[in-house]
Image (cartoon, grey):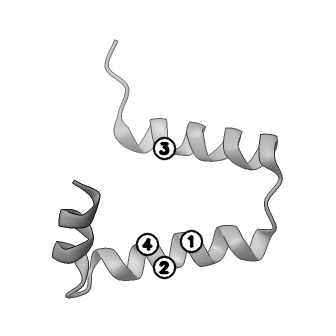
Amino acid sequence: MDVPLWLALIVVGWLGVKLTRPPAWLVLVLLLGGYLIADSFLAPAVDTAIK
């Protein structure tokens, strides 16, 4: 069974929010920060740090 990545991320994110109940501001900061870093000059550095 092939599941699109965007669908898997939505499901995992929804389950994480439902089970751990983080504050809404923390979720927004993580989403916005990840989006901004992915398109910045820091992306290669973050990619090598993760791998």
Give the residue at mark 3: 9
Front residue of 49/24: it is 49
Q: Secondary structure at mark 1?
A: helix
Query: How far, Cα to Cα, is label 1 from label 4?
Result: 6 Å
Q: Residues within 10 Å of mark 1 (few under 14, many from 20)?
A: few
Q: Are marks 2 and 4 in contact (CB under 8 Å)?
A: yes
Pointers 1 and 4 in contact (CB under 8 A)?
A: yes
Q: Which residue is mark 2?
A: 33
From this view, report whether residue 9 is shown above or below residue 1: below
Task: Say how many tags the image has.
Answer: 4
Q: Position of residue 41 (x, y in %)?
A: 20, 88
Which amino acid does the dot numbered 1 rest on?
A: Leu
Quadrant the N terminus occupies? top left
Residue at the image position 18 percent from the left and 64 percent from the top:
48
The residue carrying mark 4 is: 34
Q: Where residue 7 sits in the image (x, y, percent)? A: 47, 38
Which amino acid type is shown beneath numbered disc 2?
Gly
Reading the chain from its start, which is encountered first: label 3 or label 2? 3
Q: Name the residue located 27 percent from the left edge and 80 percent from the top edge.
A: 39
Task: Tell whether label 1 touches label 2 (CB within 8 Å).
Answer: yes
Q: CA distance from mark 1 to mark 3?
A: 14 Å
Assess disc 3: are there few (<14), some (14-19) or many (≥20) residues with their C-alpha within 10 Å of its C-alpha: few
Determine the secondary structure under disc 2.
Answer: helix
Amino acid marked by disc 3: Leu
- Give the image quarter of residue 36: bottom left
* Foreground disc of the pair 1, 3: 1
